[in-house]
Amino acid sequence: MAAEGTKENPWKLKTPPLSSEYEMYKEVKDGKDVIVCVVGKTTLLRTIAGFIPPLAGSIRLEGAGDDAHVAEHCHFVGHLNAVKSSLTVAENLAFWHDFLGPEPGRPTADAVEAAPTANAVNTAMERLTLVDLADIPAGYLSAGQKRRLGLARLLVAKRPIWLLD
């Protein structure tokens, strides 16, 4: 008999608002645990991110303490890019760095942190080949450039969990 949470015997979960039931199981790929969700992926990701409360029980992050909210340790990337059209590429990334903080639970509203913000923004732009677009308002970017900008925000604020829908 297969253990709970395997491909042969997946976990069965229910979430609101439609009480959708979905199945998921754990696989190990390249030495890392990967959760495979068969159906209800968006609902599961939104529940983990804290947008939808679970019908029962709770979602906890192992090692983060009982009062830690999993959502504080997650990036959620949905179908929209979370890009502010009137801000430049660099301003968008600086906004997300300052809004989310460099690490969970550590906002950077202090002006003393301007240099780390600039470093994080420049590093993210370099990694996603956005440097040449730094001063362009995001509203003028192509769909692919906007998507890269949306993904670059994952790099400016450290979160151990990336929920990519």
Image (cartoon, rainbow, N blue to C red):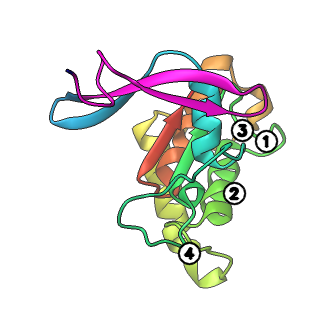
Q: Amino acid at mark 1?
A: Lys
Q: Is residue 151 left or right of residue 141?
A: left
Is mark 1 in CB contact (under 8 Å) with mark 2?
Answer: yes
Sooner in the amino-acid sequence: mark 4 or mark 1: 1
> On residue 84, which mark appears?
1
Q: Quick check: is 17 in the magenta stretch?
A: yes
Marks 4/2: CA–CA distance? 15 Å
Please name the residue that numbered disc 4 is placed on.
106
- For disc 2, the neighbor class at 10 Å (few under 14, some 14 to 19, many from 20) is some
Q: Is residue 120 left or right of residue 105?
A: left
Residue depicted at 54% across the width and 31% down the height: 13
Q: Secondary structure at mark 1?
A: loop
Q: Is residue 16 visible?
A: yes
Residue depicted at 69% across the width and 52% down the height: 91
- For disc 3, the neighbor class at 10 Å (few under 14, some 14 to 19, many from 20) is some
Instruction: For marks 3 and 2, give the one nearer the viewer.
Output: 3
Q: Nearer the viewer, residue 98 or 17?
A: 17
Query: x, y (%) of residue 64?
Result: 42, 68
Segment tinted magenta in the rendering = 2-27
Instruction: For marks 3 and 1, give the one nearer the viewer.
Output: 3
Q: Amino acid at mark 4?
A: Arg
Quadrant housing the N terminus: top left
Please name the residue that numbered disc 2 is placed on.
95
